Image (cartoon, rainbow, N blue to C red):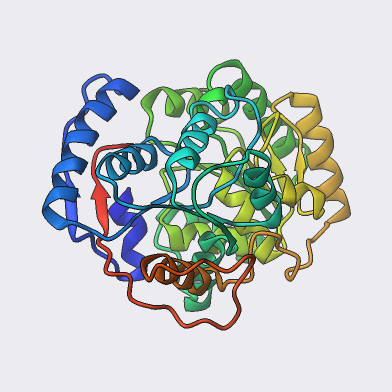
Amino acid sequence: MVEQALAPFGLRPDECLHYRRENGGQAELFAHLLPALDALLVRRRPKAVLVQGDTATALAGALAAFWRRIPVVHLEAGLRTGDLDAPFPEEANRQLIARVAALHLAPTPAAAAALAAEALSGGPVVVTGNTVVDAALRIAALELPAANPDLATVEKELETHGGRLVLVTAHRRESWGAPLDEVLGAVTTLALAHQDIHVLLPMHPNPALRAQVVRTLGGVPRVTLTGPLSYPDLVRVLRRAALVLTDSGGIQEEAPSFGVPVLVLREVTERMEAVHAGCAWLVGTDRTRVLLAADELLHTRLRVPVNSNPFGDGNAATRVCAAIADLLAGERCPEGPLQDVQPGSTGGIFVDLVGWC
């Protein structure tokens, strides 16, 4: 999945860490990752280690670098719900990374304020926007055709008979079981009640999740279940969608750039900026709440202003590169966003952690 995501950008890792997971537990993951990352750091001796987000691999990379006294740069820093159970274990991961980071790259002023409130003793906080917005806009500009055959079929159906596309993604650990059943039940009712919509649901590779989705939605009219979409296909769907129902963090940030309203299938979100900006609505997983919100948005045909994305303007990468260059040069990083700065060379390496999913 990592290599699939990198391919549209013409990127290939310089280093790959391979291992086979047996039980899928966090302890097993760290037991493999930490020694491999430590050996890599000793061999390559990077001047800094950049970790992105709140995954277990990000935390492992941060710890390995910190123990080797290599500066840790945290991209997408400062996202918080304040609840260690939601999302689990991501909320703990990002809080732990913040304690060892030498530079915090926050996507929004609210994220920077959250870091300030924690009175961290580490390095400076720089508001950069989120690079996911850069990526979405760059891929959108390529106008790539649909690669997934299921998506191509749905597009042909819409072009032939008209109608609107609704994207649904639900895979977070806290949604497994009864909460996901509620969401899938709402999607079923929605598809049957709105004859002009076609629902596309890319299924997570997890076999248990796939079985749960197929059991409820398999055979429902105008509902297409497919495997994970490539990033260009996901962006293509977002550009065309009338509505998105998701528990994904990244989609909450990407969709506003294309004017798509988002229903967030979670009880709490670390991306309240989208809610406050009127780009997203926090509806949880209760079937009635999801249906009421979706019905209203579909009836009103609401669109979000495309220039109102609170997570960035597509220029986060230049600010990120400039902040890292300042860190490596021993300079104090500027407070707040940087403007019109050309990316500098940071002497980094890119590591692909194969088998982490």
Q: Quadrant of the C terminus?
A: top left
Q: Quadrant of residue 264?
A: top right
Say if 209 sits above or below 298 in the image: above
Residue 13 horizontal side relative to residue 295, left or right = left
**Image coords of residue 197 (percent x, y):** 70, 49
Q: Residue at x 65, y 59 (%)?
A: 311
**Image coords of residue 341 (percent x, y):** 52, 81
Q: Quadrant of residue 195?
A: top right
Say if 330 sits above or below 97 in the image: below
Q: Quadrant of residue 219?
A: top right
Residue 121 horizontal side relative to residue 346, left or right = right
Q: Residue at x 66, y 61 (%)?
A: 161
- Label count reads 0
Q: Residue at x 16, y 39 (%)?
A: 36
Say if 269 sits above or below 13 in the image: above
Say if 22 sits above or below 251 in the image: above
